[in-house]
Image: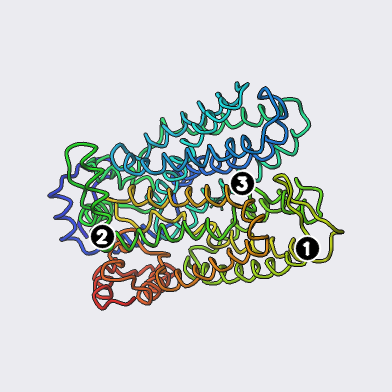
Amino acid sequence: MSEIPKTDSLSLTDADVVDKSSQDDQSSDMLLSMESAKPTFLVVVLVCFASISGFMFGYDTGYISSALVSIGKDLGKDLTYGEEEFITAATSLGALITAIFAGSMADIFGRKPVLMFSNSLFIVGAIIQCAAHTVWTMIAGRFIMGFGVGVGSLIAPLYISELAPSKFRGRLVILNCLGITGGQLIAYGIGAGLAHVNNGWRVQVGLSIIPPAVQLAAFLFLPDTPRFLISKNKLEKAAKVIARTHRGATPESISYKIAETKTLNSSIPGDSVFSKTWNGIKEIHRVPSNFRALVIACGLQGIQQFTGFNSLMYFSSTIFKAIGFDNSTAVSIIVSGTNFVLTVVAFFIIDKVGRRRMLLVSLPVMMIALIVNAIAFHYVPLKFENDSVELTDQVSNWGYVIMVFMIIYVGAYAVGIGNVPWQQSELFPQSVRGVGASYATATNWSGSLVISSTFLTMLEHITPTGTFALFAALTAVSIVFCYLFYPELSNLALEETQQLLTGGFNIKESVALAKKRKHQKLSSTGSIDKPDLEYVDRVSNSNSV
Ligand SMILES: O[C@H]1[C@H](O)[C@@H](O)[C@H](O)[C@@H](O)[C@H]1O
């Protein structure tokens, strides 16, 4: 083995990097062991600070339902049903708008500055709401806060997946999802606690200023991702970050990693921000592997929303009140608590069980729970009047059936489709990762907006049975989609994923490759193959679906 120079004295040029990669076969062994080693302390710190964005996503979408109940006349008048809907939807709409641009901005300016920008939006939005004395000021505050939510919901998982060693990537991205579901749970909890406090909702909104302020301050001192730095040719900086984020990294394995990332991640041509963005958009449609990645990423985000979960998140208290359970706060906490606890389960199993298997088991469970609910609602006598829904008779056993199967549905959601789509960044090569993540995140927010703004109308016009049967049918279509198009990506390096999608969706091959990787990484002998890109090439050419 050649002599190992000190990491911090690394001075890399393009020629060095490529030369090293062709010379040193052993580096590839080291690279794989580096990708399997436990995350360093710095990675854990970075992921925790990045996951504050997930927390903000959850808290800001979660606090509004209880805030609306306690606002009373604080905005100058009693709120109409339409105004309440506007105040709620403003954040999702704001998020949808910025999600469209955030990815390109992240590719051009970096993940870190864009994340910090989202913090200022969270803070400004919250201050406006705290000071609001009219409905429109409140809507403006929620809208600006939504801009922050959209950017944060895209950047945090992207940042984490680029930093994480591949063996732990799934789990580390789920930490951000724990932030989301934990944020929703805490928002409901605080909402319940402040329900009867005068202007308690202002306290609830005011508290939301603390986490982004902490994140903003922390990121002043934290680095951008090596993959972004490499794309900007800042190789020395990238080498330093890789050395600090990968246990056991040596200058040789670092050089190899940089060489591999550079070779596989050609950057988007163009001399202005506009032309680069435009070329990125063209490339994501024209290059078949990118387009396949896009179909999968948007498909999964669409499935996450159109199988109906957020109708429960936002309206569980309305539904359960309607079927006779009066303690609506308790019910909301049960729903968000189940979502949170099962996200913890997802955290432990995602890299072991695999994303594809998790989806193919949990989606059918969701479908069955939705069918049972559709049937159960048929036997619950409900009446719709003046934007409200009421039980016309005593609560029956069917009410309990609905309650139990809703919880089963939420649990199955959290262990699969609630979290897997946020692994979206792993599908795209560096050059179009931001644009791809934008499309997928925008699909998520569009779905969330559609479901939350049509759910009550659907209940009234196609009945609860019709609504849940529709969600069940959409879940059935989703199962077929995942079976045909979603390859197993657990344990693969980001660069391998990109090659895997060349020439087809390669489902069978992906499952075999993920198994092989898992086996290699579990191997206690420490003898690990070099990254098997030739293997991926071969299977891509022999094509499947
Ligand atoms: O992954 C999250 C999570 O499942 C939340 O509970 C849900 O409200 C969001 O829409 C979703 O994107």
Of badges 1 and 2, nearer the viewer stands: 1
Mark 3 lies on a secondary structure that is: helix
| Residue 251 at least partly seen | no
Identify the image's colour scheme: rainbow, by chain, secondary structure or one colour.
rainbow
26 up-or-down from 123: above or below: below
> Dot 3: within a 10 Å radius of its alpha carbon, few (fewer than 14), some, or many (20 or more) residues?
many
The residue lying toward the viewer, choosing from 128 and 540, is 128
Of pointers 2 and 3, the one earlier in the residue sequence: 2
Residue placed under numbered mark 1 in the picture: 380
Secondary structure under the numbered disc 2 in the rendered image: helix
Q: Mark 1 or 3 closer to N-term? A: 3
Q: Who is closer to the viewer here, 428 or 13?
A: 428
Residue type at numbered disc 1: Val
Give the residue pinned by disc 2: 27
Dot 3 amino acid type:
Gly
Mark 2 beta carbon near ligand 1 (under 8 Å):
no
Q: Position of residue 469 (x, y in %)?
A: 62, 67
> Along the line of sight, which residue is nearer the eye, 120 or 303?
303
Give the quadrant of the N terminus.
Answer: bottom left
Query: How far apart, in angstroms, are the residues tagged by discs 2 and 3?
Result: 40 Å
Q: Nearer the viewer, mark 2 or mark 3?
A: 3
Q: Position of residue 219 (x, y in %)?
A: 43, 33
The residue located at (26%, 78%) in the rendering is 542
Which residue is tagged 3?
182
* Relative to 327, 92 lies left or right: left
Image: 321 above or below 409: above
266 above or below 408? above
For label 1, count other residues whose C-alpha is less than 10 Å away and answer few (under 14), some (14-19) or many (20+).
many
